[in-house]
């Protein structure tokens, strides 16, 4: 409810109540005044008539009756009147029809006027019926009980009585009326009073209304302004009008002050908000930039995590995840999945010899070839409806993996892998030169060889390892037997880690004979592992394992120490063996190894020239400067002999050969074998020998086990032979005998015939 309405209502109620109260008070006042008037009228009327004392004294009923009637007429209020003698006798009453008022008191006491309302019990029932009685004693100087007086001599007695003498109550005039009579008399006055009060009420209400409007309006306006402030809808520069000098004006002034403050505050808040929104804007721009960077980084991380940087192909991780899904789909559709694992050994060598960049180019070329082959093989590998379901990943440094899925028959994997093999072994142009890469392919099938990604990959890996080990010129399919082999390799690797070298390892020595002079110019130390349960294990089975696990370092040190001890022993026995060569894996050639060589030689007080290190070609093409430094130290500082083993199987780089401080070159057994089958091999062998002679390198030809080979080699100008033709690798004691007996001389003599 609005304040003005409330104010008006309150005013109406207040004015109405006060009107009623005022009306009541006025009417009560009027009522009392009427009573007083009535009493005064009675008194006046009675005192102005002196005949009362006489007529009552003599109980003159007719005179009293007449005077009472006259007296009653003079009264403004309709009244009954009765005259009593002091002894209580009723003399007369008017009107006669009504019950006369009974005497109020009967006493001989002298009183002036006794006015009182007597309300008999019966008449107290209601206000309207209540009677008002006035008892007026009539006084006389004549004693009412003086019965000797007659009406005639009464006047004389009256004169005779002193005016200052005692006065006696002769009788009473009792006047009575009812309240109703008063009210009847007051009716007009009451109506007038009520009308007056109502008029006053209306005027007051009008004034209240005017007042409430004059106060309520500005208050309502202020309230509205306050409300709009509270809901933030305040229009710019709102001000309350100040037209008055009263309290409302003062409040408006105060509120205008507040409004001004609010406006200023609002202006400041607006500025702050604008600044904040600028800041928020720039912050959100920065945030979006940061988000973009983060998502870029995430994309990059995803790329790094899931894709190969060089070829852009999925990596092993992504491939394994895809494979998991593909296996499930294939199981549902009852189809096969082929996993083709491709390893290119040549790639590793290219990286080592030509640098990473060339290696990466070759890698991309290989990836491209694989993709092309797979595209061409689509029809045979899967149903046409299978859509684009080729999957190629780079899963290792030089390993690719191809997933063939949706295959109806296992044969499809066979065909695709064959094609891949031919495509990848096709000569590749590297740095303007054609070369053929060694490629090994292993194939496994799901669900036949594994029902989950890792098992399937492992199966393909086993098959590929076998292809690599056997240098298979075709893809190798996984078989259970291969897996057994794989497990054996694993077991062997574990056994090697736990092997007690002194007890389980042995060095055999294969003599190197200069067939031109008949001298033993040296012997190559070849390791054998006498496994506690598996018996004698040849080096090709465990040296690669030792290289993979890093055990080759410890093993190499053992070989170095063992060979040196054996040399020292032969020397101490006075047995003539100019040198012993040991095989040094590329991984072994570290600073620690160099120190080890130096320490062992000095510890055993050996002539460094007795020790020869056989290094592989691949070592020379690694880190040129470091290798050069190491070899120079070994050769020039320590005085150890250096030999290049298996020459011809690697890069056969003449440039390298000429730059390193080498003493000897060993022609690999594969050339010796190949000579008999191919003219090309024979020519290459002849060229290698000729070249080595040009470079002033000693030449040792390995693996000569037939007279024919021997003769050809001799023809080519090489005379130092290491081969079964003269001796297999021998235990140290047998070597001693071999050196002592020189039985090989007979063989040479026979061959030379
Ligand atoms: P390699 O250094 O080229 O050793 C020559 C291999 O040819 C030896 O095989 C030797 O027994 C074999 N051989 C020599 N003449 C003939 C022959 O007329 N006919 C046949 N069929 N074979 C012949 P082995 O002892 O099995 O060694 C194989 C390879 O193992 C070695 O090739 C060498 O690379 C590695 N190896 C052997 N011992 C060690 C070693 O102590 N440390 C390292 N790092 N590698 C070693
Ligand atoms: Mg060797
Ligand atoms: Mg060799």
Image: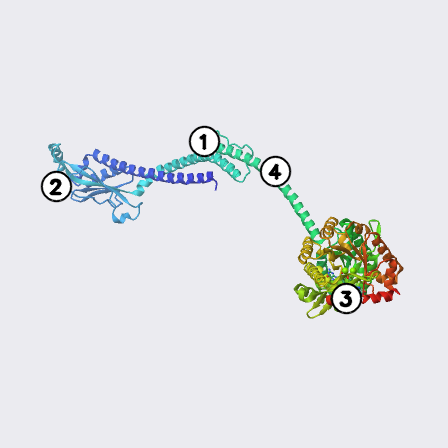
- Is 75 or 245 nearer to us in this picture? 245
Q: Can you tell which of label 3 and label 4 is closer to the viewer?
A: 3
Give the labeled residue for mark 1: 250
- Report how far apart the C-alphas of labels 3 and 2 lie in the structure: 206 Å
What's the CA distance linking mark 3 and mark 4? 99 Å
Residue 241 visible? The answer is: yes
Q: Is residue 327 visible?
A: no
Tell me the element at label 2.
Answer: loop
Q: Which residue is mark 2?
A: 145
Question: In the displayed structure, does residue 710 sit left or right of residue 326?
Answer: right
SS type, badge 4: helix
Asked whether the residues under the numbered discs 3 and 4 touch, taking CB atoms below 8 Å apart as contact, a structural biologist would say no
Q: Is mark 1 within 8 Å of ligand 1?
A: no
Q: Between tags 1 and 2, which lies in front?
A: 1
Q: CA distance from mark 4 to mark 2?
A: 124 Å
Mark 3 or 2 closer to N-term?
Answer: 2
Dot 3 or dot 1, earlier in sequence: 1
Where disc 3 sits, the SS reads: helix
**Residue labelled with disc 3:** 740
User: Where on the picture, by quarter, is residue 617?
Assistant: bottom right
**In front: 369, or 713?**
713
Label disc, if present, on residue 278 of the rendered structure: 4
Query: Which of pointers 1 and 4 lies earlier in the amino acid sequence?
Result: 1
């Amino acid at each position: 409810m609005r304040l003005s309405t409330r104010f008006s209502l309150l005013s109406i109620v207040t004015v109405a109540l006060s009107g009623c109260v005022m009306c009541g008070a006025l009417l009560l006042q009027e009522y009392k005044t009427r009573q007083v008037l009535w009493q005064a009228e009675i008194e006046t009327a009675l005192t102005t008539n002196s005949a009362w004392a006489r007529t009552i004294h003599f109980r003159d009923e007719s005179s009293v009756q007449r005077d009472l009637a006259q007296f009653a007429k003079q009264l403004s209020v309709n009244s009954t009147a009765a005259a009593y003698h002091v002894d209580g006798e009723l003399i007369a009453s008017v009107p006669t029809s009504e019950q006369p008022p009974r005497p109020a008191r009967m006493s001989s006491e002298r009183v002036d006027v006794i006015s009182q309302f007597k309300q008999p019990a019966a008449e107290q029932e209601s206000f309207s019926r209540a009677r008002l009685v006035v008892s007026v004693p009539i006084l006389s100087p004549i004693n009412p009980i003086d019965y000797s007086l007659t009406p005639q001599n009464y006047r004389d007695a009256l004169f005779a009585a002193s005016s200052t003498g005692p006065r006696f109550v002769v009788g009473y005039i009792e006047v009575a009326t009812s309240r109703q009579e008063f009210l009847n008399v007051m009716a007009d006055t009451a109506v007038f009073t009520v009308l007056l009060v109502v008029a006053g009420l209306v005027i007051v209400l009008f004034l209240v209304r005017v007042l409430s409007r004059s106060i309520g309006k500005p208050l309502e306006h202020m309230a509205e302004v306050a409300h709009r402030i509270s809901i933030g809808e305040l229009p710019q520069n709102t001000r309350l009008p100040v037209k008055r000098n009263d309290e409302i004006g003062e409040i408006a002034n105060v509120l205008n002050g507040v409004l001004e403050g609010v406006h200023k505050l609002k202006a400041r808040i607006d500025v702050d908000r604008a600044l904040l929104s600028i800041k928020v804007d720039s912050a959100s721009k920065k945030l979006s930039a940061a988000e973009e960077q983060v998502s870029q980084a995430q994309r990059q991380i995803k790329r790094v995590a899931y894709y190969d940087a060089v070829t852009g192909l999925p990596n092993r991780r992504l491939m394994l995840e895809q494979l998991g899904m593909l296996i499930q789909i294939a199981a549902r559709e009852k189809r096969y999945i082929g996993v083709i694992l491709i390893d290119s050994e040549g790639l590793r060598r290219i990286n080592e010899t030509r640098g990473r960049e060339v290696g990466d180019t070759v890698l991309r070329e290989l990836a491209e070839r694989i993709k092309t082959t797979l595209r061409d093989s689509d029809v045979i590998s899967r149903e046409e409806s299978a859509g684009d379901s080729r999957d190629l990943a780079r899963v290792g440094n030089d390993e690719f993996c191809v997933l063939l899925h949706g295959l109806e028959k296992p044969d499809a994997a066979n065909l695709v892998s064959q094609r891949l093999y031919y495509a990848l072994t096709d000569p590749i142009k590297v740095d303007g030169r054609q070369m053929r890469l060694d490629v090994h392919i292993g194939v496994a099938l799901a669900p036949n060889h594994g029902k989950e990604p890792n098992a399937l990959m492992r199966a393909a890996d086993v098959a590929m390892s076998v292809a690599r080990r056997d240098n298979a010129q075709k893809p190798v399919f996984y078989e259970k037997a291969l897996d057994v082999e794989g497990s054996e390799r694993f077991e062997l690797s574990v056994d090697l880690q736990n092997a007690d070298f002194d007890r389980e390892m042995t060095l055999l020595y294969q003599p190197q004979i200069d067939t031109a002079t008949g001298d033993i110019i040296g012997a190559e130390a070849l390791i054998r592992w006498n496994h506690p349960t598996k018996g004698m294990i040849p080096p090709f089975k465990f040296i690669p394992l030792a290289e993979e696990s890093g055990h080759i370092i410890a093993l190499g040190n053992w070989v170095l120490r063992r060979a040196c001890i054996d040399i020292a022993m032969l020397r101490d026995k006075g047995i003539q063996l100019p040198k012993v060569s040991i095989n040094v894996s590329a991984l072994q050639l570290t600073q620690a190894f160099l120190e080890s060589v130096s320490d062992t030689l000095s510890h055993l007080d050996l002539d460094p020239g007795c020790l020869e290190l056989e290094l592989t070609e691949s070592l020379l093409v690694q880190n040129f400067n470091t290798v050069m430094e190491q070899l120079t130290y070994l050769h020039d500082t320590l005085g150890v002999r250096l030999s290049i083993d298996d020459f011809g199987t690697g890069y056969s780089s003449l440039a390298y050969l000429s730059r390193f401080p080498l003493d000897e070159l060993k022609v690999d057994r594969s050339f010796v074998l190949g000579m008999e089958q191919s003219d090309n091999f024979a020519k290459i062998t002849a060229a290698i020998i000729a070249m080595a002679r040009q470079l002033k390198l000693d030449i040792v030809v390995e693996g000569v086990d037939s007279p024919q080979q021997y003769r050809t080699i001799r023809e080519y100008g090489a005379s130092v032979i290491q081969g079964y033709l003269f001796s297999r690798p021998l235990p140290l004691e047998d070597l001693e005998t071999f050196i002592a007996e020189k039985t090989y001389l007979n063989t040479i003599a026979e061959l030379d015939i």
